[in-house]
């Protein structure tokens, strides 16, 4: 999902938006690669944002954005060129910075436990407006992901929604992604067409559910970007406090997850810590301190 955002007024892709000190996709990508021990990966970037290429490893630039199914197929072909022929594939979006490695691990585990060809990461939305609905049979198998514009009144009441993250058998993707047809008004190839294609061919598609909605929130506007940034900041700060840091007013500091705290650190309100910063043991960071990419915060 790398489309330009009209709502932001700027010419930038979703992955260009900065949050936690880097392009919005980086937290998810780094967490996936480091925590899941991914053997090979491909990042899809629309060609018009080629200035982002130098920031990432193994980027895949496509001349034409033809939908999520097309991007996934190009990724499969790129991995095949690297010698990948089987295994488990993880497909995700670059504008969902809050997703954690534990959630992605759960998605992969569900695929294996269910012996499925495809597992979609689903969540219950407080307000499902705008999301694709995950439609399931009585025994829990996913038979369709229905875009909201195509939902019946009954389907619109369904709160189980598609997060845009999928785990799948790589061989299944290799076989069925080329069969997706652009049979929609946008003339694009939709990855969400896979469940129908798979189940109609005797394959099994399931859902991994129960994840917090805030963990899979996407970004489509400046307001949503600010909301996601606030949630991520709360997670970082509370993690530091659970490790022993004393943060006097958690709502009045900005601390990136790259910052390393020593023991018995006290942080006063209105502090900004970002980049490569190490806070020594027994430090007290005074109000209005601003440290970015420094080796130490002085006592």
Image (spheres, rainbow, N blue to C red):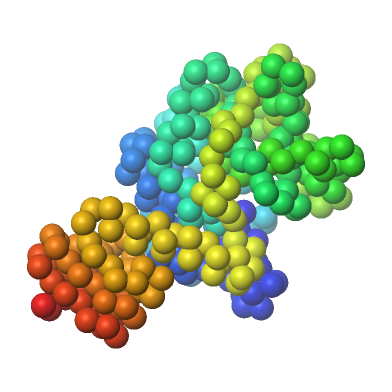
Where, by quadrant of the figure, is residue 258 drawn? bottom left
| Residue at the extreme front of the image, as rendered | 248
Q: Is residue 47 left or right of residue 133?
A: left
Q: Quadrant of residue 298?
A: bottom left
Residue placed at 44% from the left, 51% from the top?
A: 28
The picture places residue 159, in percent across and down from the top left corner, at: 72, 41
Residue displayed at 68% across by 41% down: 161
Using residue 272 as the reference point, say whether residue 286 is left or right of it.
Answer: left
Residue 198, image x, y percentages: 70, 23
Considering only vertical position in the picture, is 48 above or below 25? below
Q: Residue at x 33, y 66 (%)?
A: 256
Question: Can residue 58 be seen in the rendering of this structure?
Answer: no
- In-front residue for pair 213/14: 213
Relative to 203, residue 46 above or below: below
Location of residue 20 in the rendering, given as x and y in whole percent from the top left corner: 40, 65
Residue situated furthest right in the rendering:
153
Residue 117's x, y, as percent? 59, 22
Which quarter of the rendered picture does the N terminus lie within?
bottom right
Please state the total of marks drawn on the protein image: 0
At a point 43% along the width and 46% down the height, the residue shown is 100
């Amino acid at each position: 999902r790398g489309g330009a955002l009209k709502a932001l007024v700027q010419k930038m892709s979703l992955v260009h938006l900065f949050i936690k000190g880097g392009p919005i996709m980086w937290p998810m990508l780094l967490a996936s690669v480091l925590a899941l021990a991914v053997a090979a990966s491909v990042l899809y970037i629309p060609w018009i944002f080629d200035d982002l290429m130098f920031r990432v490893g193994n980027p895949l630039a496509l001349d034409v954005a033809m939908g999520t199914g097309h991007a996934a197929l190009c990724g499969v072909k790129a991995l095949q060129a690297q010698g990948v022929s089987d295994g488990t594939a993880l497909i995700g979006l670059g504008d969902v910075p809050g997703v954690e490695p534990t959630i992605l691990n759960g998605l992969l585990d569900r695929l294996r436990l269910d012996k499925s060809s495809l597992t979609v990461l689903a969540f219950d939305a407080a307000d499902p407006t705008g999301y694709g609905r995950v439609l399931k049979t009585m025994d829990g198998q996913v038979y369709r992901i229905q875009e909201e514009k195509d939902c019946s009144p009954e389907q619109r009441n369904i709160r189980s929604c598609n997060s845009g993250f999928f785990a799948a058998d790589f061989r299944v993707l290799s076989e069925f992604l080329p069969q997706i047809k652009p049979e929609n008004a946008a003339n694009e190839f939709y990855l969400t067409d896979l469940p129908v294609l798979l189940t109609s061919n005797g394959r099994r598609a399931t859902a991994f559910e129960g994840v917090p909605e805030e963990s899979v929130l996407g970004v489509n506007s400046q307001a949503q970007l600010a909301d996601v940034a606030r949630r991520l900041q709360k997670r970082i700060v509370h993690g530091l406090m659970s490790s022993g840091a004393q943060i006097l007013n958690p709502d009045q500091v900005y601390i990136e997850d790259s910052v390393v705290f020593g023991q018995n650190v006290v942080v006063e309100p209105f502090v900004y810590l970002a980049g490569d910063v190490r806070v020594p043991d027994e430090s007290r960071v005074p109000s209005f301190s601003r440290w970015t990419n420094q080796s130490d915060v002085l006592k």
